[in-house]
Image (tube, rainbow, N blue to C red):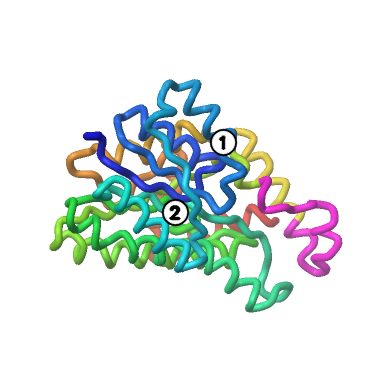
Amino acid sequence: MNSPTVLITGTSTGIGLEIAVGAARAGWRAVATMRDVSRADALRRTADAAGVADLVEVRRLDVTDPTSVTTCVADVIAAHGRLDAVVNNAGAGHVGTLEQETVDDVRAVMEVNFFGVLHVSRAALPHLRDSGGRLVTVTSVGGVVGQPFNEAYCAAKFAVEGFMESLAPVAATVGVIVTVVEPGAVASEFVANVGIDRDAAVARAGAYGPALRAYLERTAGAFAAAQSSADAAAAVVATLTDPEPAPRVQTSLTARQFVGAKLADLDGRAVTALTAGWVA
């Protein structure tokens, strides 16, 4: 009953699942949310194997539905009396380029990856103020470095990073710590969920076909040597207990080096030269 409570979004697979189990191992009551609770079996099995099933509580939450968000947060407060932390983890990948997709396609990416974060954060902030809590958002190195064929996804993640960097000093005045966590390539179902058939996508890409093929081949190699979901999740869980977490945290040395290259590149030439090589 004395365990602090953390609400985590997007916990059916990958990093979110591991965050929920890792937080429970660290003594938190993990409210593990997902859009479709019928997909909770893997989480429950993992929590049971880790001996923390009693600290992992599955609830439905669709980050794109404000009513779902406010209902879930209200139910958590009713059940536990407080909310000590939120981890915005839910997100969706997207591969495409401007000429070959609609503005509505881009809006859909923003709804999940940007506005979903805002819906959850806004609903939670009054309760985080009450508890002196933490607002942690899993972004991506793609929230710092723009990447080929990830225009909409990177735009959403850039928006999250800018929003949270701006919010952090304001939230600190009312006792809430804001942190963004930036994974690089992670071996999880996230990439599979993008749903790309490489040959079909290249065939549809027309003039962009050669660049897309090069990008997809390069990306497949990067994810073959990716960080595990559990390792990435450990960096997120650490922000829940660190007395003074940094506003920006990378989950691996590779992610730190990649983000560092961008932040040191004042005119953008070094980074664009790097990413141009991905589509050559």
**Element marked by disc 1:** loop
Horizontal placement of 13 versus 58: left or right? right
Q: Which amino acid does label 2 sit on?
A: Thr
Residue shown at the point (42%, 21%) measured from the top left? 51
Q: Is residue 146 magenta?
A: no
* Quadrant housing residue 267: bottom left
Residue 247 position within the rendered picture, expressed as x and y whole percent measured from the top left: 27, 52
Relative vertical location of residue 211 with respect to residue 54 in this rendering, above or below: below
Is residue 269 visible in the rendered image? The answer is no
Region rendered in magenta: 192-212
Identify the residue under disc 1. Answer: 226
User: What percent of the width, then of the height, locates residue 52?
Assistant: 40, 26
- Residue 218: x, y in percent? 67, 46
Q: Is residue 258 above or below residue 280?
A: above
Q: In which quarter of the image is the C terminus?
A: bottom right
Mark 2 or mark 1, which is nearer the start of the sequence? 2
The residue shown at (25%, 34%) is: 1
Label annotation for residue 139: 2
Task: Please determine whether, in this image, residue 43 is positioned above or below residue 274.
Answer: above
Residue 202 makes an appearance in the image:
yes
